[in-house]
Image (cartoon, rainbow, N blue to C red):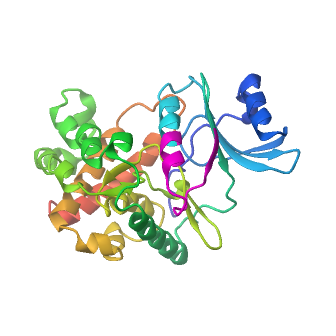
Amino acid sequence: MTTLPPPAEGVRLEWAAVPGRVRAALERWAGSVVVGADSQRSGFSPGVAARLRFKDGQRLFVKAIGPEPNPDSPRLHRREARIVAALPESVTVPRLSWFLDEDWVVLVFDEVTGHHPAQPWRPDELDRVLAGLGDLAAKMTPSPLPVSVVGSARDAVARNLCGWQRLRDDLSADRDQLDSWSQRHIEALANLEARAPQAVVGETLLHFDVRADNLLLTDETVWFFDWPHARIGAAWLDLVGFAPSVTMQGGPLPEELLKRSPAARAANPDAITAAVATVAGYFTRQALQPPPPGLPTVRAFQAAQGIVAREWLAARTGWT
C-alpha cells in the first residue's frame, strides 16, 4: 500500500469569522456586497483564505488574520503585502488590490482560477513548474526590491535555518529524539551547515517557500503565491528548498531536479551541499517542536520533508 504524504493543510477560519466591521470595510471598498465565500483548505496559515463572490459579479481572493490563534501570522501578512505591492508587473504573482492593517490584517488579491499541481507529481506539470521557477529567477535578477525591504538569504539562514547547530548545542531532550544518522553525524552536520550563509549569497529575489500548495497552474501560466518569506540570495536556492517536497509528494529525487536547472548546474557543488544541509537541519529540528497555535499539521509535513532532505544530504556527502 502506498503511503500518502502529509497534507499541506492547516485549520482555516471561515470568512464569517472575520469581524463584521472588517467585512463591511472591504465591501465599501469593493462597492458591492459579498454573496459567497469559498474557503481554500491548502496552505498553513491559520487565518482566512477564501475566494469571494460579490453581488455585482466581482471575484476576489482574500487572506485575513487576527491576533488569534497565532500572534506571528499578522506580521507575516503585513510583510507579504509590502513585498507583493512592490513586485514588477512582469512576474506571475497575483496583484494586491486592497490592504487593511488594523487589529485584523486583510489582503485582497485579483483572483486566479487554476489548480494546484497533482499528487503524485505529473511529469508535464513538474516541467512547467521548473520552467516557471527558472523564468521567475531570471525576472528577479537583480532583485527588484532592496535588501532593506526583504532581507538576505544569508541572514535568514544564519539566524533561523541553523537546525543542526541548535541541535548540537541543545541540552534538552530534542537530541534524544533524533534518528541515528543525525545523532552519529551531528558535529559534522553542524559544521557543514555553518558554511551555508556564505554559500547562498546572490542577487536574486527568492520566494523562499516554494511548495505545490503555493502554486497554481492555469492553461498558460504558473502562478506563485504567498511571499512573506522572500529574501535575496542565490538563484538556485528556491529549487533546493522546493526539491524535498517534490520527492515527498511522489516526484523525482532532488538530485534529478538539480540536473534540470541551469542555475544549479552552474553553481559550486559544495555551496549546494551546504544549502542542502541547512534545509535538512531546518526540517529535522522543526519537526521535533510543538505545533504552532492554529497549525496542528505542519510538523508532520516538515518531518516528511526532513526524511527526504537527510537522505539527499547523506548521498551528497557520502555519510552513510
* Residue 118, above or below 175: below
- Residue at horizontal 82%, vertical 39%? 31
* Residue 100, above or below 6: above
Q: Is residue 219 left or right of residue 306?
A: right
As rendered, which of 306 and 201 lies closer to the eye? 201
As rendered, which of 101 and 314 lies closer to the eye? 101
- Residue at horizontal 46%, vertical 43%? 228
- State yes or no: residue 93 in magenta: yes
* Residue 80, above or below 211: above
**Residue 13: x and y, percent?**
66, 34
- Residue at horizontal 45%, vertical 44%? 300
- State yes or no: residue 161 in magenta: no
**Residue 157: x and y, percent?**
26, 45
**Residue 108: x and y, percent?**
66, 42
- Residue at horizontal 67%, vertical 58%? 112
Q: Is residue 177 left or right of residue 106?
A: left
* Residue 209, above or below 175: below
**Residue 140: x and y, percent?**
40, 60
Q: Which residues are magenta?
A: 81-98
Which quarter of the picture shows residue 94? bottom right
As rendered, which of 138 and 170 lies closer to the eye? 138
Answer yes or no: is residue 265 visible.
yes
